[in-house]
Amino acid sequence: MKIFVPLDSAAKALGADEVAAAIQIEAGNRGLDVTVVRNGSRGMVWLEPLVEIEIDGTRKAFGAVTAEDVPSLLDGTLESLGTVEDIPFFARQTRLTFARCGLIDPLSLAEYEAHGGLVGLKRALALSEEEIVAEVTNSGLRGRGGAGFPTGIKWDTVRKAVSARKYIVCNADEGDSGTFADRMLMEGDPFTLIEGMIIAGLATGATKGFVYIRSEYPDAIAVMEAAVRIGLKAGLLGTNVLGSGKAFDLEIRTGAGAYVCGEETSLLNSLEGKRGIVRAKPPLPALEGLFGKPTVVNNVLSLATVPVIMEKGAEFYAGFGLGRSKGTMPIQIAGNVRHGGLFETAFGMPLGELINDIAGGTASGRPVKAVQVGGPLGAYMPVSKFNTPFGYEEFDGQGGLIGHAGIVVFDDRADMLKMARFAMEFCAVESCGKCTPCRIGAVRGVETIDRIDAGDAGAVHLLTDLCDTMKDGSLCALGGFTPYPVMSALTHFPEDFARQKEAAE
């Protein structure tokens, strides 16, 4: 009997370690032959710890299991959810990037291969650099970290750059509120990220890679470091990748947790041992990146999606999605919702369907007031925008952005003026200080919103002007995108900004 208990950070926070220990003790006391496998998460956080029991090749799910439930779990009297694949939240997904997450032992290379792993890499080893880049370009894959820049174009720029040394850098500094897909994938299926980075190296001529993970992700760091050691021992990494004669080495680096290091040039400075501040562009990192050499900087999800593209082909992947938003997007649902978790689906699903149907509405049972999409720099979308399809251009046309596809839901008790103030305060705290519009503008933004809160209606025009300055003049997206949550709150929820002065005044 195999029993799967997630090692995912969210599951552990909800008692997964205690459940795993209780199963070992109870099985030992009963003399049962039980193997406990610490898998990744299936992504349904409200059901964690989600325990699965496999008997004769069939897995049945149970959730949310506590240590006290273990005796009845082993007795066979605990109510089952059936198979994970039949749970409605999971059944409606199109799992490509996360196909193996939660299904396998994350650190078993044999299980990884048995479930389709390394097929894409083996195909890539037989192709030229140009052919690999063409496949990624034709798939329509765009950056999943926020900007949505075409991955193939970035790779081709690095491929064509002339240099004795090139690098692949994975941006795993997942700092947006309501996002956890990078962490979940690294903890649940690390070899798919490693495989994607090796393919990126083959496509561009890079033989060295770095994964930059924020220090707040100790479990992801530990799993990735273990996966690299296993990969080196198995010949997946090193001087002779799968016996091909081609080299690719990989290191895991830990960042200090600065939000601005999610911006690629700040990240590169941090990797070089410098202060994490934004670099002016040009030069682009693709031409002068890490240590001044041509560098691919991609998000975890971008790189982890490459293996399935190489395995199934560009046409297969491009067959999913909407318009220029090709493929699938792992959407992270958080905040005031009944069903929070990771939902991977093809681009195009309306925002309202995601909130009301997939997420099940608010956990409080109160009406939804606003949904922030894209992290702390994302716009607040009102209910009137719920028919907006989930796609890059579609969201941009409504004054929003997808970013890393984190969704945070708020009910009708949310004070949008206070949410706007939080956005400005967040920017002020996290600013690297390199440019004046962000460094000073965010501080003045907090002060201006406080004036509005005190009843100074004339400060609304000042806030609008300040946001225009930050948007147009900031060096990077931190200052440039902070106006999105502020102005969307002001535009869609003006009643929350119509403060009245006290009668005494």
Image (tube, helix red, strand yellow):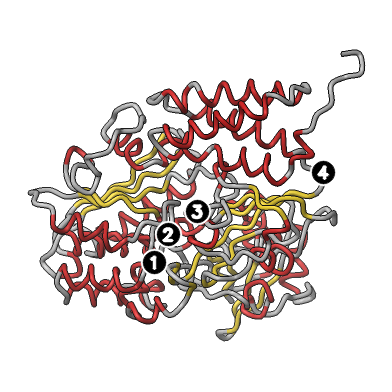
Residue placed under numbered mark 3 in the picture: 404
Q: CA distance from mark 1 to mark 4?
A: 38 Å
Tag 4 or tag 2, which sits nearer the N-term? Answer: 2
Q: Nearer the viewer, mark 3 or mark 1?
A: 3
Q: Amino acid at mark 3?
A: His
Secondary structure beneath label 4: loop
Tag 4 or tag 1, which sits nearer the N-term? Answer: 1
Q: Amino acid at mark 4?
A: Arg
The quarter of the picture where residue 307 lies is bottom left
Q: CA distance from mark 2 to mark 4?
A: 34 Å
Q: Nearer the viewer, mark 2 or mark 3?
A: 3
Question: Which quadrant of the rendered structure holds the C terminus?
Answer: top right
Determine whether 142 is above or below 131 in the image: above
Rendered image: mark on residue 413: 4
Secondary structure beneath label 2: helix
Rendered image: mark on residue 301: 2
Q: Residue furthest top?
A: 504
Determine whether 406 is above or below 283 in the image: below
284 relative to 100 in the view: left or right: left
Q: Nearer the viewer, mark 2 or mark 4?
A: 4
Q: Whole-percent x and y of residue 220? A: 46, 50
Tag 4 or tag 3, which sits nearer the N-term? Answer: 3
The quarter of the picture where residue 34 lies is bottom right
Tag 1 or tag 3, which sits nearer the N-term? Answer: 1
The answer to whether marks 2 and 1 mark residues whose Cβ atoms lie closer than 8 Å is yes
Residue placed under numbered mark 1 in the picture: 305
Q: Whole-percent x and y of residue 202? A: 19, 64
Q: Whole-percent x and y of residue 139? A: 34, 73
Q: Residue at x 16, y 69 (%)?
A: 130
